[in-house]
Amino acid sequence: MPGIRVCDTISLGDKQVSATQEQMAVRQRIKVQVMGSRYFVVKEQAVPEVLLKVVEAKKLLDTGRVHTVNEAADQVGISRSSFYKYKDDIFQFHDNSQGTTITLTFQMEDEPGLLSDVLKIVAEFGANILTIHQSIPIDGVASLSLSVQVLPTTGNVSEMLGTMERQKGVRNVKILAKK
């Protein structure tokens, strides 16, 4: 690394300590992790391919289909360094959603039975509806806010959201909050 000697001095709180290049790299990673603590929910098509492959490699390891990071990385077509670089930074939304509440907003056309169809989707995936707020339609479009409790028995939340988005008359679905 340019500018870093084998033994540099770094600050840890109010202490000055000497550090090897490896320790400097660890310090840099910690700094990046502290600075980058915001989370985003994005659709799969917006995620770079390398990150999707990291998720796939993690799944291979978690399910026991492979036993080493090297095997997982080779199988999905990424380097081990890419796996280690991103493994703690990406996860599938539904993996961490069990036992949580998700608040969604919708823009829906004012059509008889459309709200009922959306609520049926929630029921089909086994989630629990906590609150429903619908505005009076303006120019044929109503806003809907829906709070859903994701239970241990709830199906794949990403699929549920996709099914809602594909429902005729639903213009968009956004996740407002996840608690």
Image (cartoon, rainbow, N blue to C red):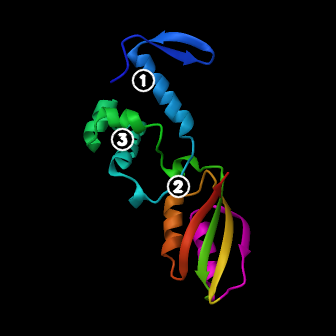
Which residues, given as a range, are shown in magenta? 112-138
Q: Is residue 31 left or right of residue 76?
A: right
The residue that disc 3 covers is 57
Give the quadrant of residue 109: bottom right
Residues under labels 3 and 1: Cα distance? Answer: 24 Å
Q: Nearer the viewer, mark 2 or mark 1?
A: 1
Residue visible at 36% across and 14% down in the picture = 5
Sequence-first tag of 3 and 1: 1
Residue 129 magenta-drawn? yes
Give the number of marks.
3
Residue type of the residue flagged with mark 1: Ala
Residue that protrudes farthest toward the front in the picture: 3
The residue that disc 1 covers is 25
The residue that disc 2 covers is 41
Sequence-first tag of 2 and 1: 1
Q: Is residue 168 left or right of residue 138?
A: left
Sequence-first tag of 3 and 2: 2
In the image, which disc is placed on residue 88? none
- Is residue 51 placed above or below 121 in the rendered structure? above
Residue visible at 63% across and 15% down in the picture = 14
Q: Nearer the viewer, residue 141 or 118?
A: 141
Residue 73 magenta-drawn? no
Q: Is residue 80 visible?
A: yes
Residues under labels 2 and 1: Cα distance? Answer: 29 Å
Residue visible at 56% across and 34% down in the picture = 34
**Residue 157: x %, y % from top left:** 54, 58
Residues under labels 3 and 2: Cα distance? Answer: 20 Å
Give the quadrant of residue 154: bottom right
**Residue 171: x %, y % from top left:** 53, 78
Q: Nearer the viewer, residue 66 or 135?
A: 135
